[in-house]
Structure formats: C-alpha cells, structure tokens
Amino acid sequence: MGLTRVETLERELPIGMQKNRPTVLHVIPGLHTGGAEHALAALVTAKRTQPFSQIVVDLMGTTLGDGAPTQIVRAAGVPVYQFGGQTAFDLPIILFRLARLIRKLRPIAIQSWLYYADLASLWALDLSGQRATTRLYWGIRSSDMDQSHYRRALAWTIRACAKRSARPDAVVANSFAGRDVHRGLGYRPRAFPVIPNGIDTQRFRPDAPTRARMRAQLGLADDKPLVIHVARVDPMKDHASLVSVAAALPDIHFVAVGTGTDSINAPTNLTALGIRRDMPNVYTAADLLLSTSIFGEGFPNAVVEAMACGIPVVATDVGDSHRLIEDTGAIVSPRDITAMVAAISRILAEPEANRCARASAARKRIEGRYSLDRMVSTFDALHLHAILPKSDEGDCR
C-alpha cells in the first residue's frame, strides 16, 4: 500500500506554508502516462504570478512505477502522495488516508480527475468533516465510453457517480461531447462547466532544425511523407484501423507512438516507437497526424499538440475532434478506412503554399482557443474563487 512513501511525505510537507497560502488538492486514480495525467501535470506545474499550494494524490501509485507525469510534478516541487491501492479491498484504507490528509491540509478546493477519484474524493471529504469549508469539483475526461471493453467496476462507478453528481459543487468536463454524453447517463450536477485542456505552445511548436534531426534518427528523407499516430494501445484507440491505413498507403511512412505500440503487428512502412518522453520533438518530424479513435475521446490531446506544431490532422468524428479541428484538417467516420486513406492522400498532395496555410491556421487556432494559460487561469478562478467559466461555445450549466 505504499505506506513508507505516504508517511515520508506527511513529515516533509511544509504545513506552515498552508497558513499563508490557500491549498488545492488534486486526486487522480493513477499518475501515469495518459491525457488526463499530462493535463494535471501541466496545470499544477504552470508558472503563476501569485502562487498557491497544490498537492496531488495518486490513489494507486507507488514509487516503483513512477510515470513521466509523476516525475514532472515532483520536479516542480509539487508533493505527490502515493497510496498504492490495487484492489477494491484497499478502498477503506485509501478513504481513511485521504480523509486524514484533507483534515490536515484543509484545502479550499479538491479537484478530482476521472471516475474512481470522483467517488473517492466525495466519500473521503464526507469522512474528513471538512465539507463545509472545502469545495469539491469532479472531473469528466471522456465521452461515450464503450463499457463492454473494460472491467465491470467501471460501469458500476459511472452509475454511482451519476446518482451522486449533484453533491459536488460542480462537475468539470474537458469537452462538450463529454458533457452531453454524461447528461445522457444521468448526471445532474449543480453546475457543469467545460474547461478544455490547454497546450503549452512554447513546447509544442514548429521547429525546422528539430524536424531534420528527428527525421535523420528515423532514417527518413526530408521529402518522405510521414504520418504520426499518438495513442496507447487500448480498444478505444483502434490501432487496427491505423495498420489498415498504413497497409493501403505503402508510399507513405507511418509512426505509432504510445504505450504498447512497440508490440503491434505492423506493416513495413509503420515504425512503432513505444513510449516517448520527447513528444514535442517527435511531432516536428511529421507531415500529418492520424487519430483513429472509435469511442470514448473527450478532448484528444494528440490532436491539439500536433496542431500546435503546425501539423494538420485527420481524425475520426469522436469527442470534440470536429470542434477542435474545424477546417484546418479533415474529419472522417470511425473505422472508415477508405475515407481515412482519401483524406490523408488529399492533404499530403496539396501544393506547398496550401499546406503551409493549413499548418499556420492549425497553430493559430490552438494559440487562440486552447492555450495552457487559458486553461490555467480558468481552473485557478474556479479553484481559488469559485468563479465558473463563461464559455464562448456554450453555457456552462
């Protein structure tokens, strides 16, 4: 259960700091590689003119399995509590520890990330006796999950969250598609704001020298078309479609990045890189990003990261992909291999001037609507001052 690490952190935490600064507590099931995990890491490590205390609880984490987000958060000086829970039998002690931590920190707000953390945060806050002084915000990070692909515990947890969705002060979705889907699942929160993920456009940006270096590492000539696919191997990501598209376009090289990709059965023109810690560099080598997800996406980080690097995107019509891309790329139906092949071929065959204009439009769209600064300021207003965001794309309730 990771007792040693938890107890060490409790001794090391500068509790005296809490008297001078408000504290926001973030709770997530696991701080490993994934969209929600990287969004959390970006939020808590962002620079602020008026800093406050932020602390992260990783319900299932242990020091033996620290992922990249954990390392990023710790390197920024943000404490990470790892509770090491592995089974449902660990839930009582996890709730006890989380409640004890809440009593000790007395945070002004708790932000939970993903379903299991939503329930755990609600129950632990009740146990802590701090509900009157601590606001609770749940976090929705997906849309239409096909629950048949996952453990029964997921379906039970979603139903339990729906029944209790009026209890937190608000439920925060990172996509409009996710909000709509969860309303259909029975969510009836007091407030239902949408705060899209934010991208650090100084990290994710076009970079010609890096492009040349990365292509050299991949053994590709500068004029060789390269399509990148960024996703862990998971039923929702549909790597089978990626393999089919690559096989249909033998003159184009494909690169797959993400957990488990190094074990997929790939055609000769598809290079699987597995997990990479240098994604801003990897993106620069590409001419186009392909997203093949068939369900579940809310706000696909890979789509906006690629766009910030000036890379056009062909994506399936899942989650908020259409809203993100608009006319800077192409949207196709899930599993429609013919449409994917046609869209990729059309964009890569455009005149250079057209492709440059498309790349510029994609980056400008991210800079204007999905920047890291915008996400951080919106979350800070909610966490510190209980100010709900005023969306320019829909009401927040």
Image (cartoon, grey):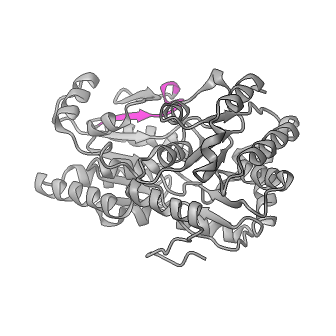
Who is closer to the viewer here, 4 or 337? 4
Q: Is residue 284 left or right of residue 268?
A: left
Q: Is residue 276 left or right of residue 224?
A: right
- For residue 131, above or below residue 96: below
Is residue 54 among the parts visible in the rendering? Answer: yes
- The quarter of the image holding the N terminus is top right
Is residue 329 among the parts visible in the rendering? Answer: no
- For residue 133, above or below residue 62: below
- For residue 358, above or below residue 95: below
Q: Position of residue 365 (x, y in %)?
A: 31, 62
Residue at 42% x, 66% y is 323
Q: Position of residue 333 (x, y in %)?
A: 47, 60
The stretch drawn in magenta includes residue 364: no
Residue at 36% x, 61% y is 325
- For residue 373, above or below residue 185: above
Q: Is residue 74 left or right of residue 215?
A: right
The stretch in magenta equals 253-263
**Total of numbered circles in the picture?**
0
Q: Position of residue 207 (x, y in %)?
A: 21, 40
Q: Position of residue 208 (x, y in %)?
A: 17, 38
Residue at 25% x, 55% y is 346
- The quarter of the image holding the C terminus is bottom right
Residue at 44% x, 41% y is 242
Q: Is residue 243 left or right of residue 56?
A: left
Who is closer to the viewer here, 99 or 353? 99
The stretch drawn in magenta includes residue 262: yes
